[in-house]
Image (cartoon, rainbow, N blue to C red):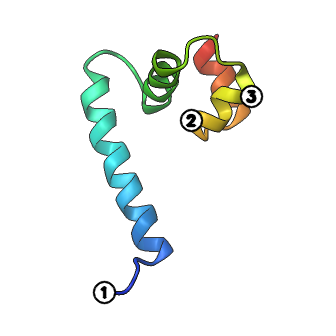
């Protein structure tokens, strides 16, 4: 049985995945936050800002910027 990853390993993996997604969506002039919001709304149309924050884990000012 292997040990569970450390928090720093999980954070590094998340950042690497984020960078890959940024490269992919960057061709469409989107950011990772834009993509996360669009994906959440595609899965659940009509989400409130609070629900979007829960789905995307984005900070409130970030969501305001993306939605505006």
Residue located at (47% from left, 29% from top)? 36
Q: How far apart in space, not on screen, are marks 2 and 3 (Cα)? A: 10 Å
Q: How far apart in space, not on screen, are marks 3 and 1 (Cα)? A: 37 Å
Mark 1 secondary-structure assignment = loop
Instruction: Give whichever of discs 2 and 3 has the lower sequence position.
Output: 3
Which quarter shows the N terminus?
Answer: bottom left
Residue located at (65% from left, 18% from top)? 47
Instruction: Give whichever of discs 3 and 1 has the lower sequence position.
Output: 1
Instruction: Give whichever of discs 2 and 1 has the lower sequence position.
Output: 1
Which quarter shows the C terminus?
Answer: top right
Residue 41, numbered circle: none
Residue located at (50% from left, 73% from top)? 7
- Residue annotated with mark 1: 2
The front one of 36 and 28 is 36
Crowd tier of the residue under label 3, counting other residues whose Cα lies within 10 Å: few below 14, some 14–19, many 20 or above: few
Residue 56 position (above or below residue 41): below
Residue 50, numbered circle: 3
Q: Given this view, does label 2 or label 1 mark the residue nearer the observer?
A: 1
Q: Given this view, does label 3 or label 1 mark the residue nearer the observer?
A: 1
- Residue annotated with mark 2: 56
The front one of 57 and 27 is 57
Q: How far across and down, in percent of the image, does residue 40 sit?
A: 51, 25
Crowd tier of the residue under label 1, counting other residues whose Cα lies within 10 Å: few below 14, some 14–19, many 20 or above: few
Q: How far across and down, in percent of the image, does residue 57 sit?
A: 61, 41
């Amino acid at each position: 049985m292997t040990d569970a990853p450390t928090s720093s390993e999980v954070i590094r993996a998340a950042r690497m995945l984020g960078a890959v997604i940024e490269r992919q969506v960057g061709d469409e002039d989107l950011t990772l936050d834009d993509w996360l919001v669009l994906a959440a709304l595609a899965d659940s149309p009509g989400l409130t800002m609070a629900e979007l924050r829960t789905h995307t884990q984005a900070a409130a000012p970030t969501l305001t910027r993306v939605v505006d």
